[in-house]
Image (cartoon, helix red, strand yellow):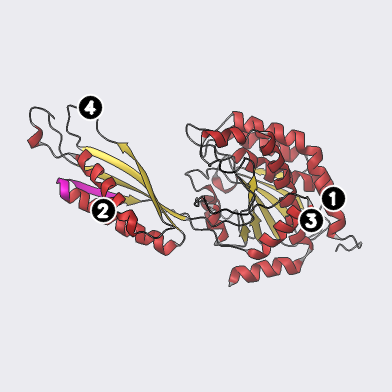
Amino acid sequence: MTDGGTTVDTLKPKVAAAVDRLADELEALSHKIHDNPELCFKEERAHAWLTEFLEKHGARVERGVGGLPTAFRATVEGAGPGPTIAIMAEYDALPGIGHACGHNVIATAGTGAGAALAVALGPLPFAGRVQVVGTPAEEGGAGKVRLMEAGVFKGVDAAMMIHGRCGTQVWRPTLGIVKVKAEFHGKATHASSWPWRGVNALNAVIQLFVGLDQLRQQLRPDARVHGIIVKGGDQPNIIPEYTRADFYLRALSKDYCQELLRRFTGCAEGAAAATGCRVDVTAEPTIHDPMKPNTTMAAVFEKNLAFIDFPVDPDDGEAGYGSTDCGNVSQALPTIHPYIRISPDGVPGHSREFAEWARSPMARAGLVAGAKALALTALDLLASPEKLAAAKEEFAR
């Protein structure tokens, strides 16, 4: 309740109505980002469009925060000092298949939430502030981790975002991920006239894949090991002297991610020994953490979905889990990462089909619902210190 006696429930219809008034602009912005996909750390046009939109609608915008040129922070101030609620926006695309993860919807839902709060309420009638944090490079660059290391999330009390999917769920686990490469070194020679003089690094990388296929039966059901051959040789008449394969190792716990790395390294060393090669295994220092659940915040978000009459779907359990740098944020402060339906059942993410649905009337409905639910949840956390305290207490357990 505000000092003037206004309750948060009387403000929610105003905020939801503001999202409706902005809906056409938000959809146009979503389509523009979708039609101009940009890869991680190169999201210059999306960054410009999103920050211009937020500035136009009354937010105070800081560009290039955390030393990342395509990051931003847009603040809607409240009635004096108080907690900070962050709404995260992603806007990078995937190589070759564009916005097949629907980041155009994520970006505009988060941006729409911040803009609607600014338009409907101006200075928020509660102590604190809401910040829309533009987080580049989720697909492969761990942008949120970089921003955390730079202090952009310092002083943030709770964070949230939505993600498009083939169903609406307020909670689904995500997997931790270790990114690793295996480089095999052999000896080049003519593949026809002197093959016995060579040491075939391609055989080694093939043996690595075979070994990992045999390993999978002994892995936990939540674990995932998948990779590609980045370098397989130069031409058929040369025994390959250098090959490289890149892999993602995923699991529901950080400890099991490290166990996967240990076993992956054993497979790589075994492949090298079997083929007479030398191998270098290099893991990236940044590990994507699994999401830490916060049922308190998820319940608030779910109630706000009910308030706007947007249904939550049962999780049929058919699909597995992905990974996100939002997991690292969730390990540092209370965070939620709910999913909003933007496609029919069974449409997989990271597919051309999902990219098409990310620019559809169903995506517009998910964008609008996501913007409303994010804005209303942020408002609830500012208006109800006890809810924010409960979220923090759960996080600390």
SS state under label 4: loop
Checking the image for residue 13, the label placed there is: 1
Instruction: Name, please, the residue furthest toward the right.
Output: 4
Residue 230 occupies quadrant: top left
Type of the residue with mark 2: Cys
Q: How many residues crowd mark 2 within 10 Å: few (<14), some (14–19), many (20+)? A: many
Q: What is the span of residues highlighted in magenta in the rendered image?
A: 274-281
Give coordinates of residue 393: x percent, y percent.
Answer: 64, 71
**Residue at screen point 62% across, 59% down:** 335
Kind of residue at disc 4: Gln
The percent position of residue 344, horizontal first and vertical second, equals 62, 40
Is 32 displayed left or right of 274 in the figure? right
The crowding category of the residue bearing disc 1, from other C-alpha atoms within 10 Å (few below 14, some 14 to 19, many at least 20), is some
Judge depth for marks 3 and 1 and give the one in front: 1
Amino acid type of the residue tagged 3 in the rendering? Gly
- Among the two numbered marks 2 and 1 on one chain, the one whose residue lies closer to the N terminus: 1
Task: Specify the label residue 267 is tagged with.
Answer: 2
Residue at numbered disc 4: 235
- Which residue is under mark 3? 78
- In the structure shown, which secondary structural element does the residue marked by tag 3 occupy? loop
Q: Earlier in the sequence, mark 2 or mark 3?
A: 3
Residue 81 in the image: above or below residue 136: below
